[in-house]
Image (tube, rainbow, N blue to C red):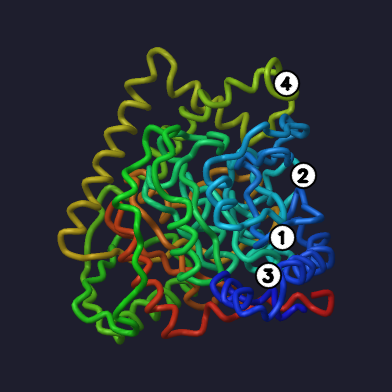
């Protein structure tokens, strides 16, 4: 049965169609695997014992009707939503079931998976390492073959970074492509729901299922621009210009990670792509601008958790959530608003313009997802600034609202490395096509963590 759990989403759909196994057998195989592996890795906060249809894992910040949704926080430990998020209803229409809700940094605030009130998730490649965050459980679930695919959310890198650290595919769609209705808001001008999958083709399919306006999220774009066509020119990148930003290869980038990323870029060149150096000059200000904008929106969004309407009181917030609420409240306060929030908003515009200018020279921009591979559990938890800097390559795309894809591209120190492919606004098609051509010309996506005899 365990062979079933190693299949991609598309392979699973085909096998079900050809009646190689039943939906019941599929779910049984996944549940047996979860039972063996989940106690070690702490991936699921809620497991559905009798899931129907195709088993997907859902980040526990996305509301699921009649299934507990905690956002990784004590405050919502007993919250059972009376409705589902739009993306959940859309998956249901496609015959997708929920096998479980995955662990995450509390209210999606964190880059390591260690800020959950329910304990840290561990990396399937090495249980002493972090899986990345905040979609820690979703990325680990896909890497450990505990679901066919997962949904996560990405505000400043929370899909791409754990996907990179766990050796799976992660897609942050353009801001507004996927409706956020039913996702518990962290920073409303940045949050985006997206897929974490075993292949690029799977990510394309899930994106198609969940895209387009729902009448509830006013930022959602027209469905006419939401069709993502499969890659036609397989194995050939002739005529494609790939931008490499000089700012993404400087101080702070681990030498082992840089070597792997350079080899991936070389592979793109061998496949016919023209490599072009581009500049994103305001990159150095991205982390500072992001933490001001994001924490300001956090302080506003968290105000509803006042102990009156939802769950318990604010004393149940974890330290990272409290830190961001205080930072945001300060940035928005009288006398400081112009110095902090207004300036950060200006920097955001400059970063967006950097990308627009760079895309005049190329179709996509590539580089690292994370400056390092997965680090030790507990290593950065007492040093928030070091933790924040781990998102230095994912934050700029979030501020600009453009799509980003993480594709497995090798290993450093025995741990996975992801190649980040960034595209123009609403041009998911190009990054998915290039990602798929790269994926099919390498074997990295087929590598699986050795979870021992228990698996």
Locate the C terminus and report the quarter of the image it occupies. bottom right
Pick whichever of labels 3 and 1 is earlier in the sequence: 1
Disc assigned to residue 122? 1
Q: Is residue 53 above or below residue 199?
A: above
Q: Nearer the viewer, mark 2 or mark 3?
A: 3
Residue in the image at 73% along x and 64% along y: 128
Dividing the picture into quadrants, the one containing residue 30 is bottom right
Q: Judge whether residue 370 can be spotted in this image.
A: no
Find the distance from the CA under tag 3 to the CA under tag 4. Answer: 37 Å
Secondary structure beneath label 4: loop
Find the distance from the CA under tag 1 to the CA under tag 4. Answer: 29 Å
Q: Is residue 53 above or below residue 15?
A: above
Q: What is the x, y in percent for residue 390?
A: 50, 54
Q: Nearer the viewer, mark 3 or mark 1?
A: 3
Disc assigned to residue 145? 3
Q: Is residue 213 left or right of residue 358?
A: right
Secondary structure beneath label 1: loop
In the picture of the structure, the residue carrying the numbered disc 2 is 118
* Residue placed most toward the observer, 335 or 203: 203
Locate the N terminus and report the quarter of the image it occupies. bottom right
Residue in the image at 64% along x and 78% along y: 448
In the picture of the structure, the residue carrying the numbered disc 4 is 313
Residue in the image at 16% along x and 64% along y: 361
């Amino acid at each position: 049965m365990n062979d079933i759990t190693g299949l991609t989403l598309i392979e699973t759909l085909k096998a079900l169609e050809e009646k190689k196994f039943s939906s019941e057998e599929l779910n049984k195989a996944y549940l047996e695997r979860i039972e063996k592996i989940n106690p070690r890795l702490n991936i699921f906060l809620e497991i559905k014992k009798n899931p129907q249809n195709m088993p997907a894992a859902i980040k526990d910040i996305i509301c699921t009707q009649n299934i507990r949704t905690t956002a990784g926080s004590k405050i919502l430990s007993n919250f059972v939503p009376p409705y589902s998020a739009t993306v959940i209803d859309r998956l249901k229409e496609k015959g997708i079931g929920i096998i479980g809700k995955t662990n995450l940094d509390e209210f999606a605030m964190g880059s390591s998976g260690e800020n959950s009130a329910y304990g840290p998730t561990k990396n399937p490649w090495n249980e002493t390492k972090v899986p990345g965050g905040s979609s820690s459980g979703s990325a680990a679930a896909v890497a450990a073959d505990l679901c066919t695919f997962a949904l996560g959310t990405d505000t400043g890198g929370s899909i791409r970074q754990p996907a990179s650290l766990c050796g799976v595919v992660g897609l942050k769609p353009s801001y507004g492509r996927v409706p956020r209705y039913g996702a518990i808001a962290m920073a409303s001008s940045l949050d985006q729901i997206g897929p974490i999958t075993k292949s690029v083709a799977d990510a394309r399919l899930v994106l198609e299922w969940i895209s387009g306006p729902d009448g509830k999220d006013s930022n959602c774009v027209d469905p006419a621009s939401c069709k993502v066509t499969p890659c036609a020119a397989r194995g050939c990148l002739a005529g494609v210009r790939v931008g490499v930003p000089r700012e993404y290869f400087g101080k702070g980038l681990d030498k082992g990670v840089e070597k792997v990323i350079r080899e991936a870029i070389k592979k793109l060149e061998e496949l016919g792509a023209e490599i072009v150096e581009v500049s994103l000059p305001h990159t150095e200000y991205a982390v500072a601008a992001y933490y001001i904008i994001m924490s300001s929106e956090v302080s506003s969004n968290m105000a509803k958790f006042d102990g009156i309407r939802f769950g318990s009181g604010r004393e149940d917030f974890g330290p990272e959530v409290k830190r961001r609420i205080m930072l945001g409240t300060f940035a928005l306060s009288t006398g400081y608003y112009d110095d902090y929030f207004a300036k950060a908003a200006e920097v955001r515009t400059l970063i967006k313009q950097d990308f627009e200018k760079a895309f005049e020279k190329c179709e996509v921009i590539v580089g690292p997802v994370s400056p390092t591979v997965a680090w030790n559990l507990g290593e950065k938890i007492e040093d928030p600034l070091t933790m924040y800097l781990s998102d230095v390559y994912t934050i700029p795309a979030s501020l600009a609202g453009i799509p980003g894809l993480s594709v497995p591209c090798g290993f450093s120190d025995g741990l996975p490395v992801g190649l980040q492919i960034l595209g123009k606004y609403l041009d998911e098609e190009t990054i998915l096509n290039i990602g798929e051509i790269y994926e099919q010309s390498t074997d990295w996506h087929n590598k699986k963590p050795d979870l021992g005899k228990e698996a």
